[in-house]
Image: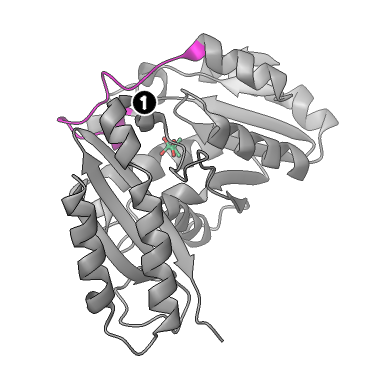
Amino acid sequence: MIVVSDTAALAEHLSPLRHRADTIAFVPTMGNLHDGHLALVNQARAAADAVVVSIFVNPMQFAAHEDLDTYPRTLDDDLSALRKTGVDLVLTPSADDIYPNTSARHTAIHVPKLGDALCGKDRPGHFDGVCTVVYKLFRLVGPDIAVFGQKDLQQLLIIKRMVADLSLPIDIQSGATQRAEDGLALSSRNQYLSASDRAVAPLLWQTLQSCGATLTATPDCEPASIIDPARKTLEQAGFTVDYLELRELSTLQLVDSVDQECALFVAARLGDTRLIDNIQLAASS
Ligand code: PAF
């Protein structure tokens, strides 16, 4: 496995890879890898002849008050985990390398509408930061396939839209959300949870499942009559709910019944830790 920390040196390492591999799959990450990331890497390996992973904590997608400085950085452990999965190349650039004039002065990519709802509302500019770095990494790596997790469903939909709008020749594939045994979606931020909050956290997925099942079984019901009590259940358990919303998948517009492809999206905080999850729903027949 080759580790390249300098984007100027990347092309020289990519060219022998391209020579021997017909297809390259790419998994962008911010490091602190867990089984969710490794599942994406395994999916990438099954889909292509060579796999490139990036590890870059992207300052442009963090607001000033967010956890950029404390975001867990575990490069040595990440590299050992990636070595075991048979990754060909890992790119670990510095912020100065990606943003020579700082991220604040960097050209930004904005995907309208899809990036404004849900997490975009609570984290203004977040998806511009994500799209900008992902676009830049796509340009540097030149993959045929890129794999993103369904846990960040809004991010996945936005990246797909960016790739379509900018006619990038990359097949965006999605990887199923990996969960702990009790259902909590794996996330680097789970480690911030106190023991008591960790015990409560699985209620998020349980609520999505039960609420999703009721919405699907009673398509004529006003969604608010099902979603509002679910929100209260979460709040009574100690969550601060940023959103719990039923939205259609292609536009992320709010919908008032499960008669089209949609998903129930949630973001909720336990203490200082913000957790997100979603469940995709389809009409029952
Ligand atoms: O999902 C993430 O870890 C990040 O948003 C990504 C896609 C690596 C961009 O920084």
Amino acid type of the residue tagged 1 in the rendering:
Gln
What crowding class fits label 1: few (fewer than 14 Cα within 10 Å), some (14-19), or many (20 or more)? Answer: few
251 over 190 or under it: above or below: below
Quadrant occupied by the N terminus: top right
239 over 98 or under it: above or below: below
Compared across the picture, whether 134 is left or right of 20 comes to: left
Q: At x 27% / y 24%, what residue is drawn?
A: 68
Q: Report if residue 151 lies within the magenta region.
A: no
Q: Position of residue 187 (x, y in %)?
A: 42, 35
Q: At x 32% / y 52%, what residue is drawn?
A: 110
Q: Position of residue 162 (x, y in %)?
A: 45, 55
Q: Position of residue 44 (x, y in %)?
A: 68, 40
Q: At x 60% / y 21%, what residue is drawn?
A: 90
When asked about the image quadrant of residue 81, the answer is top right
Q: Residue furthest top?
A: 76
Q: Is residue 15 visible?
A: yes
- Front-lying residue, 226 or 165: 226
Q: Residue furthest right?
A: 20
Magenta residues, start to end: 59-75
- Front-lying residue, 66 or 229: 229
- Quadrant of the displayed image that contains ligand 1: top left
1 over 51 or under it: above or below: above
Compared across the picture, whether 82 is left or right of 149 comes to: right
Q: Is residue 121 visible?
A: no
Q: Position of residue 117 (x, y in %)?
A: 26, 60
Cβ of mark 1 under 8 A from ligand 1: no
Q: At x 27% / y 57%, what residue is drawn?
A: 118
Residue carrying label 1: 191
